[in-house]
Amino acid sequence: MRQQIITKLLAGVAGLGLALGAVGAYASPESDRQELIKYYQSKYPNIKIDDYVYGALAFDEDSKAQYDAIMEFPPYEADIDAGRKLWETPFKNGKTYASCLPNGGKNIAGNYPMFDEAKGKVVTLNDAINDCRTANGEEAYKLGDKNTMGKLTAYMRTLSDGMLMNVKVQGPKAMAAYEDGKKSFFTRKGQLNFACASCHVQNAGTRLRSELISPAVGHTVHWPVFRGGDNLVMLQNRYEGCFKQVRAVPPAIGSTTMNNLEYFHSSLSNGLPMKASVFRK
């Protein structure tokens, strides 16, 4: 059975080059996004693109109804409150995150990741938080630590709930980072020879064992998520898990490869509203 599932998924990879164009071919981020939307709409004409913010739930009305019921009384509110406390606690110098982040940290999360021309690299929201900390004499948080960076961003992103994703790719260096992320998304890897796109482009909406596979569009609007109720998972932690699931060695969280992958991946959700801190199975 396991081999049949793998064979089915691999068969779907044959047309990947047609979904977003060949990996090596340069196209604008917006044209990539539009091509992917057209691809999904051709496969699932009855599903609105706006509904892809719900991930795999867009394909299953019963699961979506269960999700709505759970979200009325989220089981992870204590973690959001812990994040709020981290956000509001002043640094030793008396300043706060709100004092060193644009717009007091409100309605900015959808702009990340962004390309920082001065640094010559992609900067994620987590990087911006750590820059704020170190600028105020505090130690940087470990990027993959769900008890510090995870809880803080879970709360912070609620300050941008409903904001439309607005990841900008402007200039040759930013475009190079975007293309590097696109290459990572489409390149097969690991002993199972899968790409991110193997599941989330060609096989979005189909089942892997008992679970529906989510589409890449809409993916990045809702991280961190709480899986199974209270297990907080950040986006690059999830990337790390995917690498391991296909039996590949994952790049380090916060590395250029991971940040560029998040940059490309996030741009695919431009124009969709953020859904901060949500439940997932």
Image (cartoon, rainbow, N blue to C red):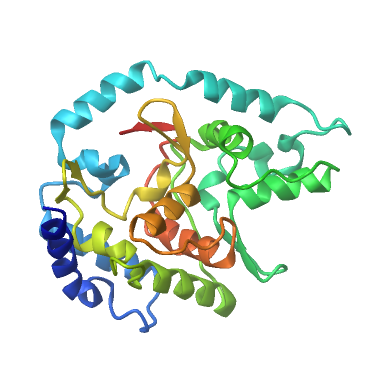
Viewer-proximal residue, 145 or 206? Answer: 145
The x and y percentages for residue 89 are 74, 26
Q: Answer with the quarter of the image where residue 279 lies.
A: top left
The total number of labels drawn is: 0
205 relative to 246 in the view: left or right:
left
Q: Residue at the spot x=28%, y=65% of the render?
A: 192
Q: Nearer the viewer, residue 263 or 5?
A: 5
**Which residue is rendered at x = 35% and y = 55% of the image?**
245
- Tell me where residue 88 appears, x and y as whole percent: 70, 26
Q: Residue at x 44, y 31 (%)?
A: 231
Viewer-side residue, 203 vs 114:
203
Question: As drawn, is 46 to the left or to the right of 155?
Answer: left
Q: Name the quarter where the C terminus is drawn.
A: top left
Q: Residue at x 35, y 84 (%)?
A: 25
Q: Residue furthest top?
A: 73
Using residue 140 as the reference point, say whether residue 251 is left or right of it: left
The x, y position of residue 196, in whole percent, is 33, 62
Residue furthest out toward the right: 93
Rendered image quadrant of residue 93: top right
Instruction: Indicate whether 141 appears above or below 190.
Output: above
Outermost residue to the bottom: 25
The answer to whether 234 appears left or right of 116 in the picture is left
Residue 59, quarter of picture: top left
